[in-house]
Image: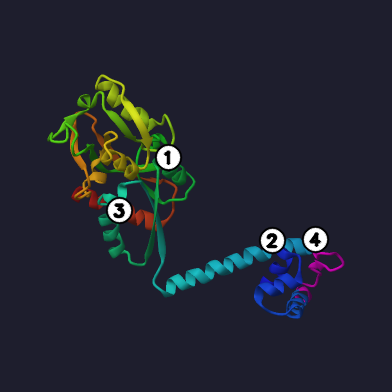
Amino acid sequence: MRYFVAAAESQSFTKAAEQFYISQTAITQQVHLLEEMLGCSLFDRGTRPVSLTPAGKIFLIEARAILDRMSQAADRVHDASTGLTGSLRVGYLRGYERSDLSVLMRRFHRQNSNVLISFYRCSTDALAAGLMHQEYDVIFTWDSTNLKTQEDIEYICAEKARLMVALYAGHPLSRRRQLNRSELRGENILYMSPDSANDSYGDAFFMQLYKDAGYKPNILFRSSDAESILMMVAAEEGISVLPEYFTDKLYNADNLVFVPLVGEGEQEEIIAVWNKGNGNPVLRQFVSVLRAALPLR
């Protein structure tokens, strides 16, 4: 069957033979045997290149499906033999790898060592799109796309991270124990955007915080890449506001100082989100572990 599919796709017995490192004669003999078993011709050998008969076209569709199922069956047998019986696809927003997410995932993996957990690091808008297209089982994100309003999703709050002002060491505010947003008036802001799109729901949220502080920010640079923003802060080009989970584990950062931002709304809520209709049993198991772990975090 594999020989037939190769010959059909390449329209050549010679090219099919080359794929399997066997002779053209061997390919031809196997296809003949297949045709005898089916009781019909699969190839029109009178054309150049060879083409499929109507029966051959139908059989190509079925053969591909059969071979695909065989491959899936082989993978499942292999997984079962090695103890791997499930998978979980986890998406998370950029920078959240510095949080305690790894602690939670390690705990779950130790309890479910037969599950393959794969991770995907994206911007918040890409995470939301991936979740809606069933590319991820669960995502950890800041709700910059207003996911909470979607009827077919479920979510729980994973954490509420306070916001920190990133300053270079020589900045006049760098020795303060805390700051409020009104004190950032007139500063060049290196804006950490929650997603890659302009004028998102998330941007509107942060811009409202500046508006509530009584001014419009002087945004010198905008990016969803926190590392690039911190490089610019360290170069003394401006200051930025970042969530604490990103800055908390930056030890001995060169020419960088982080000061807590205080005031109403000065936090970033991280939610764990999944589709209600996702039937993956590993997801349901993970959600149970997540709900039990959250009070401890």
Asked if the residue at tag 1 contacts the one at tag 2, i.e. Cβ–Cβ closer than 8 Å, the answer is no
Q: In the picture provided, is 204 more to the left or to the right than 257?
A: right
Residue under label 2: 61
Residue at the image position 40 percent from the left and 68 percent from the top: 84
Q: Hey, which quadrant is residue 20 in on the image?
A: bottom right
Residue 251, percent from left and from top: 20, 50
Q: Which mark is residue 54?
A: 4
Q: Earlier in the sequence, mark 4 or mark 2?
A: 4
Q: Earlier in the sequence, mark 2 or mark 1?
A: 2
In this view, 102 is above or below 46: above
Residue under label 1: 125
Residue 132 visible somewhere in the drawing: yes
Of marks 4 and 1, the one in the foreground: 1
In this view, 82 is above or below 281: below
Outermost residue toward the right in this view: 46
Magenta part of the chain:
35-54
Total numbered circles:
4
